[in-house]
């Protein structure tokens, strides 16, 4: 019996993922998954705010910018009821899936800056192609698990989870142009945190499949640390699976991130979001993170700055930035003031 326990423990230790200190940044200037102009310029705005330089300041982090993926503006005439711009959504996500897989195979954490949340189809598909045992933490005010039958808007940014999970594949009609994407990810490996604006059929799907979910009501009750710790334990009790975080900026309270298309009051504080990401970083298993729905065209200059800075704080916390500060490299003592004889 003791031998069996030792053998199992050693096997478990062998499967533990090693933390990565290399990241690859991908920009996705895409906004056709929703109806408001501006979210497509977010990758440029976030880079201009110092994304790459700030990530490079994190001790030991190797950062490579893989540029923006190509997005098409030429739309084929495809008729799918209550699903807007399907060909454009499909083409963007196909390119993105390939790019995410490339970054992961290069031994880097895939950091994707969107763009609206429809790009979650491409990021998760690309991650799944490399790590089939991945788990997905969807941090959002909205569940994004509508089908074209249940959506009130017809906007694809409310549908990415439903497009990805194999358990809902029978609830979709045939989707022309989406043949490249086969729903293989299991809803059993999905967890939510931050929800507070959930449609009726989305709630039905969450309850039908018993998806572990921490709404803002639950976060208020248990705190963000217990919430994410429990979520990770349910999805990955052996602490060995790669983690994908898809972070919608509207998971933050609208006061924290006003420049977004579908703000909802009563969300996460920035401090809660940072703590959430610090806990995920500490697992050493983060392999992909999306930052989506920043819209620099909404609000005034202060709103834009506040929202982009919040997004940068979230990414930095996920990738190892310490609020404690870091000592200077290679220096073990404070400088001594020398007295000049002159």
Image (tube, rainbow, N blue to C red):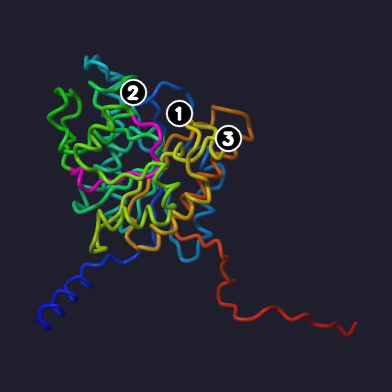
Q: CA distance from mark 1 to mark 3?
A: 15 Å
The residue under the point 26% across, 51% down is 135
Whichever of callouts 1 and 3 sits on the residue coming sooner in the sequence is 1
Residue 163 horizontal side relative to residue 317, left or right: left
Displayed quadrant of residue 114: top left
Q: Which residue is mark 3?
A: 304
Q: Which mark is residue 262?
A: 1
Q: Which residue is mark 2?
A: 155
Q: Residue 150, position in %: x, y? A: 25, 22
Residue 128 horizontal side relative to residue 328, left or right: left
Classify 304 as above or below 85. Answer: below
Displayed quadrant of residue 299: top right
Q: Secondary structure at mark 1?
A: loop
Q: Residue 33, position in %: x, y? A: 35, 26
The residue under the point 50% across, 33% down is 265
Q: Residue 325, position in %: x, y? A: 57, 65
Q: Secondary structure at mark 2?
A: loop
Per the image, is 195 magenta?
Answer: yes
Q: Which residues are magenta?
A: 185-198
Whichever of callouts 1 and 2 sits on the residue coming sooner in the sequence is 2
Displayed quadrant of residue 202: top left
């Amino acid at each position: 019996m003791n031998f069996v326990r030792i053998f199992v423990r050693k096997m478990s230790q062998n499967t533990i993922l090693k933390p990565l200190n290399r990241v690859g940044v991908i920009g996705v200037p895409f906004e056709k998954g929703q109806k408001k102009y501006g979210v497509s310029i977010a990758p440029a705005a976030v880079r201009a705010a110092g994304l790459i330089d700030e990530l490079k300041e994190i001790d030991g982090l190797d950062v490579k910018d893989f540029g923006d993926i190509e997005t098409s503006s030429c739309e084929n005439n495809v008729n799918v009821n209550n699903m807007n711009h399907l060909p454009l959504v499909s083409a963007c996500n196909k390119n993105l899936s390939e790019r995410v897989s490339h970054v992961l195979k290069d031994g880097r954490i895939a950091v994707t800056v969107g763009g609206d949340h429809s790009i979650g189809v491409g990021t998760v598909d690309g991650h799944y192609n490399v790590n089939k045992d991945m788990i997905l933490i969807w941090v959002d005010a909205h569940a994004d698990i509508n089908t074209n039958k249940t959506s009130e808007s017809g906007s694809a940014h409310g549908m990415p989870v439903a497009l990805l999970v194999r358990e809902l594949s029978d609830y979709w009609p045939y989707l022309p142009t989406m043949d490249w994407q086969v729903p293989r990810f299991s809803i059993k490996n999905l967890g939510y945190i931050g929800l507070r604006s959930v449609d009726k059929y989305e709630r039905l799907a969450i309850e039908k499949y018993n998806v572990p979910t921490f709404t803002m009501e639950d976060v208020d009750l248990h705190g963000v640390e217990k919430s994410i710790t429990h979520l990770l334990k349910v999805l990955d009790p052996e602490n060995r699976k790669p983690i994908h975080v898809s972070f919608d900026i509207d998971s933050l309270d609208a006061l924290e991130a006003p420049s977004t298309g579908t703000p909802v009051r009563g969300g996460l504080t920035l401090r809660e979001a940072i703590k959430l990401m610090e806990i995920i970083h500490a697992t050493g298993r983060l392999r992909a993170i999306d930052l989506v729905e920043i819209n620099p065209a909404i609000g005034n200059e202060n709103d834009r700055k506040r929202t982009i800075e919040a997004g940068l704080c979230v990414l930095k916390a996920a990738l190892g930035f310490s609020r404690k500060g870091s000592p200077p490299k290679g220096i073990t003592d404070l400088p001594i003031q020398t007295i000049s004889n002159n």
